Image (spheres, rainbow, N blue to C red):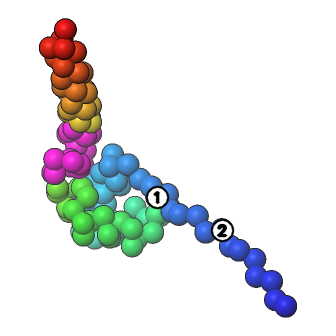
């Protein structure tokens, strides 16, 4: 009878939009300075697979090589991108608070009208 050990495979690290933008900004910087090699340099510097960086670029995660602003995740590299990310996070928080406030107002009005 053979016994197989169960291998616990963990998922890879998850990167925030700000981290991705920073890494892709570095890729763009190296590419601008040297003409190429940004992905390899970023891969070595940040200890990330070049395939991961490539997929971020292809999917338009951020950086000049893949500018993308969507309502759910603004991701332009650099200080403006960080400000946009904070602005988006605040907007999302405000929208959640307004939704909660709307629910509370509806409950309040329902109770008030039942008096």
Left or right of residue 37: residue 15: right
Q: Is label 2 in a helix, a strand or a loop?
A: loop
Residue 70 lies, with reference to residue 85, above or below; the image says: below
Q: In which quarter of the image is the C terminus?
A: top left
Q: Residue furthest right?
A: 1
Task: Point out residue 56 in the picture as x, y percentages from the top left corner.
Answer: 30, 64
Tell which residue pokes out farthest to the bottom in this image.
1
- First of labels 1, 2 by sequence position: 2
Of tags 1 and 2, which is closer to the observer?
2
Q: Which of 104 and 5 is in front in this view?
A: 104
Residue at point 38%, 49% (across, down): 16
Identify residue for label 2.
8
Q: Looking at the image, is 2 positioned above or below residue 45?
A: below
Quarter holding the N terminus is: bottom right
Counting from the top left corner in percent of width and height, residue 95 is at 20, 32
Asked if the residue at tag 2 contacts the one at tag 1, i.e. Cβ–Cβ closer than 8 Å, the answer is no
Q: Is residue 13 highlighted in magenta?
A: no
Please give the range of residues in magenta.
69-88
Distance between the Cα atoms at labels 1 and 2?
Answer: 28 Å
In this rendered view, identify the residue nearer to me: 113 or 41.
113
Dot 2 alpha-carbon crowd within 10 angstroms: few under 14, some 14 to 19, many 20 or more: few
Identify the residue shown where x is 76% and y is 82%. Answer: 4
Q: What x and y, as percent, mark residue 113? A: 14, 14
Q: Can residue 34 be seen in this view?
A: no
- In which quadrant of the rendered view does residue 114 lie? top left
How would you rate the neighbour count of disc 1 (Cα within 10 Å): few for under 14, some for 14-19, many for 20 or more? few
Residue at the spot of label 1: 45
| Residue at 16% over, 47% down | 71
Residue 81 lies in the magenta-colored region: yes
Where's residue 26, x and y in %?
Answer: 32, 55
Q: In this view, which residue lies farthest toward the front? A: 115
At horizontal 68% and vertical 73% (from top left) the residue drawn is: 7
């Amino acid at each position: 009878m053979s016994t197989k050990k169960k291998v616990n495979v963990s998922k890879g690290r998850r990167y925030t939009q700000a981290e991705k933008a920073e890494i892709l900004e570095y890729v763009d910087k190296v590419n601008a300075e040297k003409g190429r090699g940004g992905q390899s340099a970023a891969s070595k510097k940040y200890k990330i697979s070049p395939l991961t960086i490539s997929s971020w670029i292809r999917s338009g995660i951020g950086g000049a090589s893949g500018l993308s602003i969507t309502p759910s995740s603004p991701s332009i590299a650099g200080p403006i991108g960080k400000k946009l990310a904070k602005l988006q996070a605040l907007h999302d928080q405000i929208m959640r608070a307004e939704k909660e406030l709307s629910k509370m107002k509806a409950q309040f009005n329902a109770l008030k009208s039942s008096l």
